[in-house]
C-alpha cells in the first residue's frame, strides 16, 4: 500500500494556482480571451492597405495627367504648325511680309496694345455689346421657341413671318438698323440681338418638335400636368439641341459685332481692326483679329462646359 501510494503521488500533477476567489483550480480560458487580445498583436494590415490605396490614387492621377497632356498636344499640334508656317513663310519670301508680317511681329504689336491699354478698352467695349445682344436673344428666343415648337396655333400664326426674316442676313439689315436707331450703342446691340436670335430660336423649335414620342406617351399616361411635362420631359430632352443653337449664336455675336463696329464706332475690336487697316498698321490689325479668335474660342468652351453641366444626366446614362 505504501509503494502504491508513493507511486500515485509521484504521478499526480502539481495543483494549479488558485484563482481570484482563493480556491480550486484556475478557470479554463475561453475563446473570448484570444479575440480580445487579437487587435493588439495583429500585424499592421490597415497601414499597408492605406499605402496601396495611396499608390493606386497616385497612379490614376499620373495616368490622367499623361492622358490630358497627350490630348492637349494632339489638339494643339495643328495650331502650332500654323504658327510655325506663319512665322517662316514671310521670312522666306513665300508671301509679302508687308501684308502678312511674321507672327513674332504680330505678338510684339499685341503686347504693345495690351501694355498701353488700347486692347483692354476695345475688348471691353466689344464684349459689353456682344454679351448684351446675346443675352437678350437668349431671353427672348428660348421661350418663343418653346411656344412655337409645342403649340401648333402659335406656329401657324408666326411661321410665315419667321420664314421671311430667317432668310434675311443680319448684315444686309445693318444700314436699316443704323438709319432707324442711329450709330450709337442701340443699333449695334440690336443687330447682335437679331443675328443671335435665329440660331437659338430655330434649334429650340426643332428640339421641342423632335422629342421622343415614347417619352411623351409615357408622361401622358402618368397624367402629368403641362408644367411638369415641360420640366420632366421636354426641357431635358431639348437641352442638347438648344445648346447647339446657343453655341452658334455665341460665335455669331462676335462676328456680326465686328462688322457692325466697322461702321460708325469709336471703340471696339472691329474699330481697332478697321483703324489699323486705314493707318497701315498691319501687325496691330492682325493682333485685333487674333484677339477676336481667342474670345470666340473662350466663349465656345464656356458654353460647352455649361452644356455638359446641364446635361450631365445624358452623359451618365450613356456610360
Image (cartoon, grey):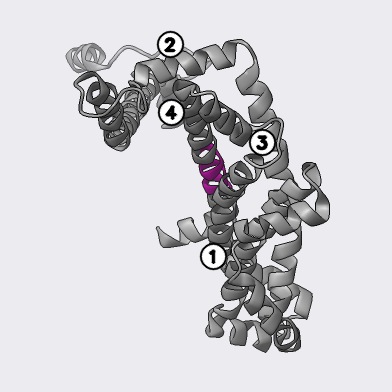
Which image quarter is the C terminus in?
bottom left
Q: Are marks 4 and 3 in contact (CB under 8 Å)?
A: no
* In-front residue for pair 288/278: 278
User: Which residue is at a point 51% across and 29% down the rendered structure image?
Assistant: 277
Residue 73, horizontal then vertical, whole percent: 28, 31
Is 222 magenta? The answer is no
Separation of residues labelled 4 and 3 (CA atoms): 75 Å
Of mark 4 and mark 3, the one earlier in the sequence is: 4
194 w.r.t. 215: above or below = above
Is 301 magenta? The answer is yes
Query: In the rendered image, which residue does mark 4 sit on?
Result: 35
* In-front residue for pair 92/161: 92
Separation of residues labelled 1 and 4 (CA atoms): 63 Å
Q: What label sits on residue 195 in the rendered view?
A: none
Of mark 2 and mark 1, the one earlier in the sequence is: 2
163 w.r.t. 51: above or below = below
Query: In the rendered image, which residue does mark 2 sit on?
Result: 17
Nearer mark to the viewer, of 1 and 4 = 1
Rendered image quadrant of residue 49: top left
The answer to whether residue 50 is left or right of residue 287 is left
- How dense is the environment of label 3, judged by Cα within 10 Å: few (below 14), some, or many (20 and up)? many
Rendered image quadrant of residue 130: top right
Query: In the rendered image, which residue does mark 3 sit on?
Result: 126
Of mark 2 and mark 3, the one earlier in the sequence is: 2
Chain part drawn in magenta: 298-306
262 w.r.t. 161: above or below = above
Query: In the rendered image, which residue does mark 1 sit on?
Result: 241
Separation of residues labelled 4 and 2 (CA atoms): 24 Å
Residue 36 visible in rendering = no
Nearer mark to the viewer, of 4 and 3 = 3
* In-front residue for pair 77/161: 161
Amino acid at each position: 500500500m505504501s509503494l502504491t501510494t508513493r507511486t500515485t503521488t509521484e504521478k499526480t500533477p502539481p495543483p494549479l494556482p488558485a484563482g481570484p476567489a482563493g480556491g480550486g483550480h484556475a478557470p479554463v480560458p475561453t475563446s473570448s480571451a484570444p479575440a480580445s487580445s487579437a487587435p493588439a498583436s495583429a500585424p499592421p494590415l490597415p497601414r499597408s492597405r492605406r499605402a496601396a490605396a495611396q499608390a493606386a490614387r497616385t497612379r490614376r492621377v499620373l495616368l490622367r495627367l499623361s492622358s490630358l497632356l497627350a490630348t492637349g498636344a494632339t489638339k494643339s499640334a495643328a495650331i502650332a504648325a500654323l504658327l510655325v508656317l506663319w512665322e517662316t513663310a514671310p521670312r522666306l519670301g513665300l508671301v509679302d511680309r508687308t501684308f502678312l508680317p511674321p507672327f513674332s511681329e504680330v505678338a510684339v504689336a499685341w503686347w504693345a496694345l495690351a501694355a498701353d491699354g488700347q486692347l483692354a478698352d476695345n475688348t471691353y467695349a466689344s464684349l459689353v455689346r456682344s454679351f448684351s445682344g446675346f443675352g437678350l436673344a437668349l431671353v427672348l428666343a428660348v421661350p418663343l421657341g418653346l411656344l412655337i415648337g409645342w403649340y401648333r396655333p402659335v406656329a401657324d400664326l408666326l411661321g410665315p413671318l419667321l420664314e421671311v426674316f430667317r432668310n434675311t442676313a443680319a448684315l444686309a439689315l445693318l444700314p436699316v438698323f443704323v438709319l432707324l436707331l442711329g450709330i450709337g450703342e442701340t443699333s449695334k446691340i440690336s443687330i447682335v440681338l437679331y443675328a443671335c436670335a435665329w440660331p437659338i430660336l430655330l434649334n429650340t423649335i426643332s428640339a421641342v418638335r423632335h422629342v421622343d414620342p415614347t417619352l411623351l406617351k409615357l408622361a401622358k399616361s402618368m397624367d402629368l400636368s403641362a408644367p411638369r411635362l415641360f420640366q420632366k420631359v421636354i426641357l431635358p430632352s431639348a437641352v442638347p439641341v438648344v445648346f447647339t443653337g446657343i453655341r452658334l449664336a455665341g460665335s455669331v455675336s462676335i462676328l456680326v459685332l465686328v462688322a457692325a463696329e466697322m461702321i460708325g464706332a469709336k471703340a471696339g475690336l472691329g474699330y481697332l481692326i478697321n483703324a489699323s487697316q486705314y493707318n497701315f498698321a498691319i501687325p496691330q490689325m492682325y493682333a485685333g483679329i487674333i484677339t477676336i479668335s481667342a474670345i470666340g474660342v473662350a466663349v465656345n468652351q464656356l458654353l460647352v462646359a455649361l452644356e455638359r453641366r446641364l446635361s450631365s444626366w445624358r452623359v451618365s446614362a450613356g456610360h
